[in-house]
Image: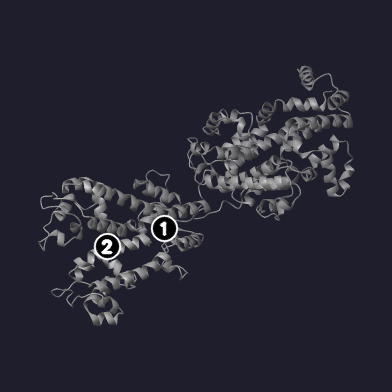
C-alpha cells in the first residue's frame, strides 16, 4: 500500500493539475458556475441563506460545511461587525467564522457624498489655492514690472496678451470681452479733454501713450507701475492679507486725488470696497447707502455713517466746490487709519480653519445634491453664515471661479456621469469640471452613493488586515511594536493613494502600492516582474485561457479581481459586485475547489486530507491558539507528536504552552520545515492507523532513509500506471 506521504506528494507536487482536474468535474464545475452567476444578485443575508445552493457552496468553500444546518448561528456570524472585537464572529475561537464573515459585505459599502480621502484632498486643494493665488499674483506682477519698460508703442503693448490682461484685470475690465480697439482708444485719449476715455477710465492715466500711440519716454513712471500693481493685487486677491491691505492703501492714495464727484468714486469698485472696510459696511448694505451718505449729512447721520460723510467734501449734488478736493490730506489719513484697523481684523479672520471645519461638519451629513447646495445661511448653524459656501469652496479647490458658475449649473454638473462622454460635465470640455465632479459621489437622482474607487473600501480594509497580519505574525515585544507602526504607515499610504488611482497603469507604476497588495495576498514582490503584472492586469478574468488564469498560483487572479478595473485598465463600476467583490468571488471559488480536492483525497485517505489542510493553513497560523481552535489542525498536531486526544482536557493555556514546546511558530512560514512536519505527521499517521509502508515512512521521518521521497513517488506512480 502506498504511504500517506507519497499519496500526499502525488497531489501536492502537481497541485495545479490536481485542482484543475477537480474544477472540471461536472458537479464542481456546475456549482461554481451557479455561484459565480448568482452571488451578485444577492443583497441580504436572508436572500443568501434562502438560496441553498449559494449558501452551502460558500459554507464548504470556507470549511464550514458541517455547520450548514445551523442557519441561525451562521446568520449571527454574517451579521457581525468585524470592526468590533467583541462581535459574535470575532468572539468565536475558530477563526474560520470571522474569515467567512469577512468574505461578504451584507452591510453594503458606505454611501457618502465624499470619502475621507476625497474630502481631505479637496480641502487640501482649497487651502493650497490661496498660496497658489499669492504666488500667481507675485509672478504676474514680476513679469509686468520686468517687461513693461521695453514697450515703445500702444500697438506693441496690445500685442502682449500677458501685459494687456494684467492691466485689464487691475482695473476691473474683462480680459475676454474688452477689445483691443476699445482699449487703444482709452490708452490714446486726450488728457485735456473732459469727455475723453481717459477721464472715464482710470486705466488710461496709468500709461503715457501719445494720441498716435507712441511714447516720448517711459511708457510708465514708477508711480504708475505702483498704481497698476496695487490695483492688480486688490482685484486678484480673494482673501485678506497684509500684502493686499498695503496694495489697497497704495491704490486709494493714488486714486482719491483724481476723484471729482460721488458718481466717479462709486464707479470704482476698489475704492468703494475700501470705504466699506474703513467704515464697517457689510456686503448686504447697498452702494446707495455710501452714495447717499457722501452727499447728505442728514442721511449719513440717520444711517450711522456720519464719519464717512465727514471724511469727504462733496456737496448734496455729489460734486465738489471750486478749489476743493474729494479729501484733504488729514481726511485721507483718517480714512486710511480706519481701513487699516478694520482690515487687520479681516486678516486675523482670514484663516481657512473655520471654513474647513464647517465644510467637514456639513459634508458629513450631506445625503443629496440638495443638501450640498443648502446655503450656510439656511442651515441649523447660526455661526457659519459668514463662511464660504460648500460649493464655493469645492469649485475654488479645482481652480474654478465660484462667481462664474451658478448653483443650477453646479447641480447639472453633479448630476452628470463623468464616465459618459455625452454627459453635461463632459460637454463643458474642461478637465477642471470633470475633476470637480469626480470629487463627489452622487447618482443620477442626486442621492449619495458608494464611492467608485480602484479598490472598494471594504476590500481595502481586508487588504489592510491581511497585510498587517502578515507583517506582525510571530513577533513580540519591541519587534512587534516597530512592525505594527511600520505596517500602519503603509496601510495609511495604501488607503490614501488607492482613493486617487484611476487606472491599472497608475497602480502598477507605484511600487509601494504593488508591494503592499502582493504582500497582503501572501505573495513575494521579488517573485514577480513588472511585465508579468502588466500581463495579469490586462487579462480577461472570464477567459479560462487568459494569462492570469493560466498561472499556477490562483492568488494572482484573486489579486487582479480585487480591483475595479475593466480589461482596458480603466476604473469601472461593472466589477464592483454587491455582497461580494469580484476578487472575493474568485477566492471563494478557488477555496471551494481546494476543499473539494481535500475532500476527494479524504475519501481514500484521511491522512492525506489532513496533510493538505495543514500545508494550506500553515502560513496563516500565528500562535498556538490558532491550532487549538481548529479541530483539524489539532488532530494534525496530536498525531504528529503522538499525543493522546485527552490533552484537550487540559487547561487551554497549558495546551498552548505544550504546542509551543513542540513547534516553533516561525517555522510555519518556511515551506521546507512545513514539509518536515508533514513527513512526521504522515509517518505517525500510517503507524497509528496501520496504513502505508510504515517502516519507510519512519525512515523518512528519522532521516535514515536510503530511498528519497521523490523516488517513492515515482515508484508509486509506476505502480498506478
Q: In this figure, which colouring scheme has been used for the structure?
A: one colour
Question: Is 212 situated above or below 717?
Answer: below
Whether residue 442 is visible to the viewer of this picture, yes or no, is no
- Residues at discs 1 and 2 in contact (Cβ within 8 Å): no
User: Residue at left 31%, top 50%?
Assistant: 142
Q: Percent x, y for residue 92? A: 75, 51
Q: Which residue is mark 2?
A: 251
Which SS class for mark 2? helix
Asked if residue 560 shows in the view, the reply is yes
Residue marked by disc 1 = 393
Quick one: quadrant of the N terminus? top right
Neighbour tally class for label 1: few under 14, some 14-19, many 20 plus, Cα within 10 Å: many
The quarter holding residue 629 reads top right
The CA span between labels 1 and 2 is 29 Å
In front here: 688 or 226? 226
In-image side of 409 versus 646 (left or right):
left
Q: Position of residue 492 (x, y in %)?
A: 58, 48
Amino acid at each position: 500500500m502506498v504511504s500517506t506521504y507519497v499519496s500526499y506528494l502525488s497531489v501536492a507536487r502537481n497541485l495545479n493539475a490536481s485542482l484543475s482536474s477537480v474544477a472540471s468535474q461536472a458537479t464542481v464545475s456546475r456549482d461554481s458556475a451557479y455561484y459565480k452567476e448568482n452571488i451578485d444578485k444577492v443583497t441580504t443575508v436572508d436572500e443568501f441563506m434562502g438560496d441553498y445552493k449559494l449558501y452551502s457552496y460558500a459554507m464548504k468553500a470556507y470549511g464550514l460545511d458541517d455547520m450548514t444546518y445551523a442557519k441561525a448561528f451562521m446568520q449571527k456570524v454574517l451579521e457581525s461587525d468585524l470592526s468590533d472585537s467583541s462581535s459574535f464572529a470575532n468572539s468565536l475561537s475558530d477563526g474560520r467564522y470571522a474569515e467567512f464573515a469577512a468574505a461578504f459585505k451584507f452591510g453594503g459599502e458606505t454611501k457618502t457624498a465624499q470619502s475621507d480621502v476625497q474630502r481631505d484632498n479637496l480641502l487640501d486643494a482649497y487651502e493650497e489655492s490661496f498660496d497658489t493665488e499669492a504666488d500667481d499674483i507675485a509672478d504676474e506682477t514680476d513679469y509686468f514690472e520686468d517687461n513693461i519698460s521695453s514697450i515703445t508703442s500702444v500697438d506693441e503693448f496690445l500685442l502682449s496678451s500677458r501685459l494687456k490682461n494684467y492691466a485689464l484685470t487691475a482695473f476691473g475690465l474683462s480680459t475676454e470681452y474688452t477689445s483691443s480697439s476699445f482699449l487703444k482708444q482709452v490708452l490714446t485719449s486726450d488728457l485735456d479733454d473732459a469727455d475723453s476715455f481717459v477721464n472715464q477710465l482710470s486705466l488710461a492715466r496709468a500709461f503715457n501713450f501719445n494720441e498716435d500711440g507712441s511714447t516720448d519716454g517711459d511708457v510708465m513712471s514708477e508711480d504708475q507701475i505702483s498704481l497698476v500693481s496695487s490695483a492688480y493685487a486688490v482685484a486678484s486677491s480673494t482673501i485678506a492679507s497684509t500684502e493686499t491691505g498695503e496694495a489697497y492703501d497704495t491704490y486709494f492714495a493714488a486714486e482719491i486725488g483724481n476723484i471729482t464727484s460721488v458718481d466717479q468714486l462709486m464707479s470704482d469698485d476698489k475704492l468703494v470696497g475700501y470705504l466699506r472696510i474703513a467704515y464697517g459696511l457689510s456686503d448686504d448694505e447697498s452702494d446707495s447707502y455710501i452714495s447717499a451718505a457722501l452727499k447728505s449729512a442728514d442721511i449719513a447721520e440717520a444711517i450711522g455713517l456720519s464719519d464717512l460723510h465727514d471724511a469727504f467734501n462733496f456737496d448734496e449734488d455729489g460734486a465738489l466746490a471750486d478749489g476743493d478736493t474729494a479729501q484733504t490730506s488729514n481726511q485721507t489719513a483718517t480714512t486710511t487709519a480706519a481701513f487699516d484697523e478694520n482690515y487687520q481684523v479681516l486678516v486675523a479672520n482670514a484663516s481657512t480653519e473655520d471654513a474647513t471645519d464647517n465644510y467637514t461638519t456639513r459634508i458629513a451629513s450631506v445625503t443629496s445634491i440638495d443638501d450640498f447646495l443648502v446655503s450656510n445661511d439656511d442651515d441649523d448653524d447660526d455661526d457659519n453664515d459668514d463662511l464660504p459656501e460648500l460649493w464655493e469652496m469645492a469649485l475654488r479647490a479645482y481652480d474654478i471661479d465660484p462667481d462664474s458658475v451658478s448653483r443650477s449649473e453646479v447641480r447639472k454638473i453633479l448630476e452628470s456621469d463623468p464616465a459618459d462622454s455625452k454627459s453635461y460635465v463632459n460637454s463643458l470640455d474642461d478637465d477642471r469640471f470633470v475633476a470637480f465632479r469626480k470629487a463627489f459621489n452622487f447618482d443620477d437622482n442626486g442621492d449619495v452613493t458608494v464611492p467608485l474607487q480602484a479598490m472598494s473600501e471594504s476590500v481595502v480594509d481586508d487588504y489592510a488586515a491581511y497585510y498587517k497580519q502578515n507583517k506582525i505574525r510571530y513577533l513580540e515585544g519591541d519587534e512587534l511594536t516597530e512592525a505594527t507602526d511600520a505596517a500602519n504607515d503603509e496601510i495609511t499610504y495604501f488607503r490614501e493613494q488607492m482613493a486617487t488611482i484611476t487606472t491599472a497603469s497608475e497602480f502598477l507604476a507605484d511600487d509601494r502600492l504593488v508591494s503592499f497588495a502582493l504582500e497582503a495576498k501572501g505573495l513575494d514582490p521579488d517573485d514577480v516582474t513588472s511585465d508579468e503584472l502588466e500581463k495579469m492586469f490586462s487579462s480577461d478574468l472570464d477567459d479560462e485561457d487568459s494569462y492570469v488564469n493560466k498561472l499556477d498560483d490562483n492568488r494572482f487572479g484573486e489579486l487582479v479581481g480585487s480591483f475595479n478595473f475593466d480589461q482596458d485598465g480603466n476604473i469601472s463600476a461593472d466589477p464592483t459586485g454587491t455582497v461580494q467583490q469580484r476578487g472575493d468571488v474568485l477566492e471563494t471559488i478557488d477555496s471551494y475547489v481546494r476543499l473539494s480536492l481535500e475532500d476527494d483525497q479524504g475519501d481514500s485517505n484521511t491522512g492525506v486530507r489532513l496533510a493538505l489542510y495543514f500545508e494550506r493553513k500553515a502560513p496563516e497560523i500565528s500562535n498556538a491558539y490558532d491550532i487549538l481552535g481548529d479541530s483539524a489542525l489539532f488532530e494534525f498536531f496530536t498525531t504528529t507528536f503522538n499525543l493522546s486526544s485527552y490533552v484537550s482536557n487540559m487547561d487551554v493555556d497549558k495546551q498552548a504552552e505544550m504546542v509551543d514546546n513542540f513547534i516553533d511558530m516561525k517555522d510555519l512560514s518556511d515551506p521546507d520545515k512545513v514539509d518536515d512536519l508533514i513527513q512526521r505527521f504522515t509517518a505517525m499517521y500510517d503507524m497509528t492507523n496501520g496504513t502505508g509502508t510504515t517502516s519507510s515512512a519512519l525512515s523518512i521521518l528519522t532521516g535514515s532513509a536510503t530511498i528519497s521521497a521523490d523516488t517513492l513517488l515515482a515508484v508509486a506512480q509506476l505502480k498506478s500506471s
